[in-house]
Each structure stands twice: as C-alpha cells, then as structure tokens.
Image: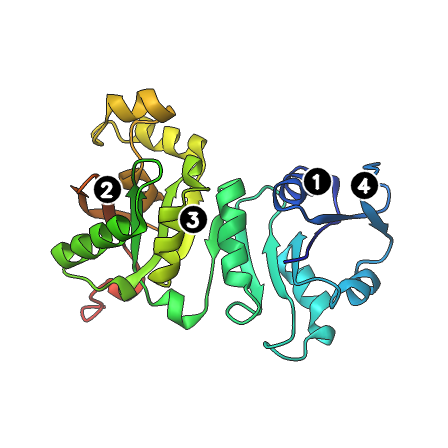
Amino acid sequence: MSLAVVVITKSGLKVGALLASELGADLHLREKISNVNTAVYFENLKEHTKRIFNRYNGLLFVMSLGIVNRVIAPLMKSKYTDPAVVTIDEVGRYVISTLSGHEGGANELAYLVSSITGADPVVTTATEANRTYTLGVGCRRAEKKEKVIDAIQKACKEAGIDPSEIRCLSSAWIKRDEEAIIEAAGELNLYIRFIPKWMIDLYYRRHPEAERSEFVFNKIGVYGVAEPCAVLSGRNTELVLCKKHDGVKVAIAREGLFSNKDISSL
C-alpha cells in the first residue's frame, strides 16, 4: 500500500515524521517548516493534494479535519476508487478515518496509526460504531492461530456475546509480528490494534487493583497484556471477563456509551 504523510506545521512534524518512518511512507511537507532531505516539499496544500490524490493508496494528513475536508471535497469520486484518507491531529491524540473507510482501507489504516502513536482511532462507519465490546489477547510466542481463536470463542461464549459484537482485537506492542494474533483477527474479521508500552505502564499505575504477573513483567516489561489492552481499546470501558484458556489469556471489556443507557426517565 503506497502511503503519503502530509504535514503543514512544525508542531505536526514529530507525529508526521514518526508515521512516515514506521509506515515506509513518503513525507510531504509545506515549505519552510523543516529541511528534511528526503521529504517532498510543496507551497499550496490544495494544489498539492490535487496532484497526489490518486498517486497513493492512502493519504495521512497531520492537521485539522476541517482543513482536510475542504481540500479533498472537490476530488472525491467514488468509495471504490478514492484513496484511503485519515486525519491525525498535530499531537497524535486522535486518528480519524476520513474517506473510503471500508473499501479503501481507511478504517484499517486508522488502527495501524493508533498502534504506532497510541492515538484513539475514530471510526464512524455504522458496522463498527454499533460494536460495543473490545478484546484483549495475550499468548506465548509462536502460538497456534487455532488456539487463539478457540480461546476467543470460549471467552465470548462465557461472556454471553457473539464475536460479531467485538469492535477490535488488541494486544501489546511487542506482539505486532505475532502471526497467530494477526491471523486470528483476520479470520474473525476484526480490526487489530497494538497498544504501546507507555500506555500499558500508565494503566497499571492508575489501576493498582489490576491483576499483575511478575512472570510477564520479567519477560516483556509490563505486568499484563490482555486486561489493559481490552480496557484501553475502548471508551469508558468496564472489564467483563479476563481468563486464560489453554495458555491464551483473553479479556473482554464493554464500552459505557450513551446508547447503552436507559433514557426513559429523561
């Protein structure tokens, strides 16, 4: 997937440069904000976006959503042919799937960016928005995909939910190359997110009551994977279940959303 990261301010350069490096993307910078030798420079964002819109499979804009909407609006033709577009704010707080979420892969790209920066992925397509559970998974190195899937299915059954109600599968940063987890997510048709170490560290500092494993800490430097990843992958989450099945740890969390509340008395 050919990608371009577009940055227009010095304050957005740190996030933009990190994404370009991690994703193997071309870095496009507005003139005078830096002197990166490998970057492509431009003067006018609107004209430059017009030039590159159909050159890449995906465009990552590090700027406000309003700016992105204005520059891509005249260029949009079809969700089947337009590139994936995501928007990241300058400090990496949010990554928003902006255009071609399903067909173009912007939703998946948003989760990929979140795995790198820790940004909250904002995915508003109806299929994903109506899923209110998040899943955290931890396993041994070189675990079998079938064992991971079996553990997830057993955990879902115990929690009284269907895997189709899960919005994303998450694991720790150190599992980004774990084939069993990646393949399990693909087979279950789940977006995948990897939580950075600093977020898991912060989770355990804020939750002294959370289950901790000295064994896991000695192995990877954090006290656990499944629980913090499930909780951190959603909004206002509450842990529903955290159990180990045949060596695979699975945690399920439920988001506390307005749509879940009883508003009959309002």
Which of label 1 and label 2 is nearer to you? 2
- Name the residue carrying label 2: 248
Neighbour tally class for label 1: few under 14, some 14-19, many 20 plus, Cα within 10 Å: many
Residue drawn at x 35%, y 52% as measured from the top left: 169
Residue flagged by tag 2: what amino acid is it? Answer: Val
Sequence-wise first label, 1 or 4:
1
Check whether the beta carbons of the residues at disc 3 and disc 4 lie within 8 A of each other.
no
The amino acid marked with disc number 3 is: Arg
Q: Nearer the viewer, mark 4 or mark 2?
A: 2
What separation in Å lies between label 3 and label 1 (alpha carbons)? 23 Å
Mark 2 to mark 3 CA distance (whole Å) = 17 Å
In the shown orientation, is residue 236 left or right of residue 71?
Answer: left
Q: Looking at the image, tell me whether mark 2 or mark 3 is earlier in sequence order.
A: 3
Amino acid type, residue under disc 4 in the picture: Thr
Q: Distance between the residues labelled 1 and 2?
A: 39 Å
Residue that mark 1 sits on: 13
Mark earlier in primary sequence (3, 1): 1
According to the picture, the residue beneath numbered tag 3 turns out to be: 193
The residue identified by callout 4 is 38
Distance from Cα at disc 4 to Cα at disc 2: 43 Å
Q: Which residue is drawn at 71% across and 62% down?
A: 56
Select label 1 or label 4 by which is in front: 4
